Each structure stands twice: as structure tokens, then as C-alpha cells.
Image: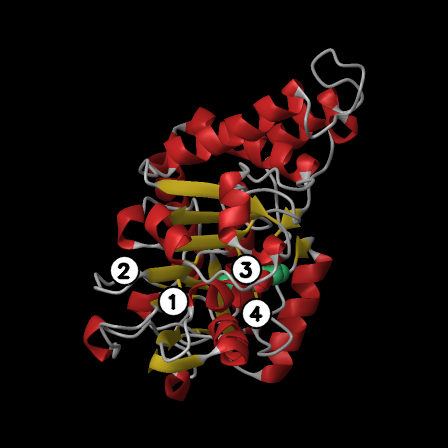
Amino acid sequence: QVTRAYNFNAGPSALPLEVLEKAQQEFLDFRGTGMSVMELSHRSKEYEEVHNQAKASLKELLSIPDHYQILFLQGGASLQFSMIPMNFLKSEQKAGYVLTGSWSEKAFKEAEVFGNPYEAASTKDDHYRRIPLQNELQYNADDAYLHLTSNNTIYGTEWKDFPAVDVPLIGDMSSDILSRPIDISKFALIYAGAQKNLGPSGVTVVIIRDDLIEKANNDIPTMLKYSTHAKNNSLYNTPPTFGIYMLGEVLNWVKGIGGITEIARRNEEKAKLLYDAIDESNGFYIGHAEKDSRSLMNVTFRVKDEVLEKKFLAEAKQAGFVGVNGHRSVGGCRASIYNAVPYEACRAFRDFMKQFQQVNG
Ligand code: PMP
């Protein structure tokens, strides 16, 4: 029996133990091939099955309609910050960006390289404590697209309902994809780096509506066109085969425990443990996000004074809780409790928070 850490890393982050064990079992001899999955040709029928099965599982779990393509790309979510404006921003056209944190700011900056993005809304003045209300969004009907970040990994806020808009809506779902049911049809494009809820780093999932692929700009490098990857089933060049294999196994794990509704139920339950500890602390712990914008994935908070906060982080580390420091840009504390973080880890951390307060409060 291995000892597993209480892993609250923000990404790369915890993977389901069952998935790691299955990968370990298959590591040297993948299904009778006498090779590791990493050693298979990406043109072999064995790999093709892995690839297509991962796509089919994602389609099933997220109820992705037929007129969307699922792509497995590289370059992280960060390359999507560039590919999106490259492909979809035409000269003379604008694109609205909803600024809800550091990642949406980065996406906005990349769009400036190619065209004319503007702020469709921003909660920066509120220290990114909240998601804007639908009536705060300002965009133009003839924009190329509207971009939002569904979960703000650093600030710990998350959109509860997505706006219904009459321009192509693009969502960076890197840190909450597959955590809850979503209405894919509200979006023209969704993207996510895999390393939080989907698998190891190295694969970026893009879900893109057919009409958007057709409308894209043509004067860009082949590898940076969505159409290249869509036409070639993400096998135009060598894909990150091991990462896609792991992604497929993570998706099997989600299916096995009851699919997206069960995952969502578990995520609500886990997050409640920690938010209750904050809310019941009489100000000892101070949550960063406004209540109705709270993320179920990244629980961000401060301890009431800086000296105590340092002590809290040091003792948490000592007690075996990994990754509870806030992002280096904002400080404070953050527990990232993605799909694969077990309830027991959250309960142990909740107990630790309660005990720390009892001793130091
Ligand atoms: N968007 C969000 C919301 C993120 O959390 C991250 C990574 N933490 C990124 C984008 C960047 O992802 P990558 O490292 O895959 O480029």
C-alpha cells in the first residue's frame, strides 16, 4: 500500500490512484503489444484506438453535440491565447474579453498582438473577488468573439451560469472542465490544458464548433490552424500519445464512478467542507471570493494576520498538505480540490484548519 500525499497542487495536480495503477500495470506491455503505449507508433491501430476512445469518452461525458470537433493539441492553454485571435480575429474586427483574473489578462494581452481586443467587463477593481453580472457585459454583435475564463485558478472564482450571447463565445475552462455539467452549445470554442481535471500536462483539449473552423483566417502557419488538426483527427503530426492515453483513462475513471453528475456532486461536497470551515471561523479565515462567485476547484483564503498565515502554511506543510500556498502573484492560501482529490483529503484539511484555529485563534 503506497502512501499518497494530500495533494492540493493547482496543476499539475492529483490524478486518480486507480488510473495511476492501471497505467503502471500496462506500462511495459500495453495490451499484449510487448511495448509501452509510449513506444507505439501514432499511426498504429492500437494507438488509434486509444486516441479515438479518448475522444468518444469526452464526447459522451460532456454531451458534446455532433457539430463540434474535439482536438488534442500541444502548447498548453497558453498557446490557445494566441491561436484564438490568430484564427478568428479579422482586421477591422474586435473581440471582447471578460477580465476575471490573471489568466484572462494574459489571454487579452496575446490578442493585442494580432488585433483589437477590448474589455467586455472587468472585476479588477474588486480585486477579482467576483464574476461580473450578465448585465455588466458590454460587447458588440459584430465582434469576432467574446472570451471568458470559466474558473479563475489564482483568485478562486468561477462562473455559475454562462451568458447567452449572440457572438461566438469562447471559454478557457482549463481549471474546471469536467467538474460539472455544462451546456456546450452556448460556446463556439472551449479549451483546457489537461493538467488539472483531465490528466497529465502535455495535452490541450479544444472543443470547437464546425462553423468556426470554416470561418477562420488562412494566412497563418499550418500547425496553428484549427482546420489542420480538425481535418487530420489531431494526427497531422505526432500527438502527445502518452498524455492522451492517460486522459482516456481519467475519462474512464469518471465514467466508472457515475459520470459528470456524480463528479459534480462530489465537488460540491468537498468544497462545502472547506468553505464551511472559512464561514464558521468568525473571521479567523477570510475567503477571497464573494460567496456567489466561489470556485468549487480552487478555495482561496487568508488567515487573519500575516504572522499566523505564515505559521499556518508552515504547519500545513509539516502535516503533509502539499500545495496550499497561494499563487506566487497573490500570496495567501489556496487548496485546489480538482476531481481526483479525494473527499478524505479535504476532510483532513478541514480538520487541520479547525484545529489550527482552536490552538491559535
Ligand atoms: N488558463 C487557466 C485558467 C489556467 O489555470 C492556466 C494554468 N494554470 C492556464 C490558462 C495556462 O495553462 P498552460 O500552463 O497549460 O499554458
Q: Residue furthest front?
A: 219
Mark closest to the chain's N terminus, 1 or 4:
1
Q: Where is ligand 1, by quadrant?
A: bottom right
Residue under numbered circle 4: 333
Name the spot of residue 234 as percent of width and height, x first.
57, 40
Q: What is the C-alpha distance between the residues marked 3 and 2?
A: 24 Å
Check the image and report above or below for 308 versus 159: below
Residue beneath the point at 38% across and 61% down: 170
For marks 3 and 1 on the same chain, the one whose residue lies earlier in the sequence: 1
In contact (CB < 8 Å): disc 3 and disc 4: yes
Label 1 Cα neighbours within 10 Å, binned few <14 / some 14-19 / many ≥20: many
Kindly tell me whether mark 4's CB lies below 8 Å from ligand 1.
Answer: no
- Per the rendering, the mark at residue 148 is 1
Residue 127 pos. (x, y %): 43, 83
Say what secondary structure mark 1 lies in. Answer: strand
- Whether residue 165 is visible here, answered yes or no, is yes
**Tag 1–tag 2 contact (CB < 8 Å):** yes
Pick the front one: 33 or 275: 33
Which image quadrant: the N terminus? Answer: top right
Find residue 162 and name its label: 2
Residue 183 showing in the rendered view: no
Indicate which label's residue lies in the foreground, 3 or 1.
1
Q: CA distance from mark 1 to mark 4?
A: 24 Å
- Left or right? Give the position of 82 relative to 3: left
Q: Which residue is mark 3?
A: 335
Foreground: disc 2 or disc 4: 2
Residue appearing at x 38%, y 31% in the figure:
60
Between label 1 and label 4, give the one nearer the viewer. 1
Residue mark closest to the camera, 3 vs 2: 2
Sequence order check, earlier mark of 2 and 4: 2
> Could you tell me the amino acid type at mark 1?
Leu
User: How many numbered badges does the structure rendering display?
Assistant: 4
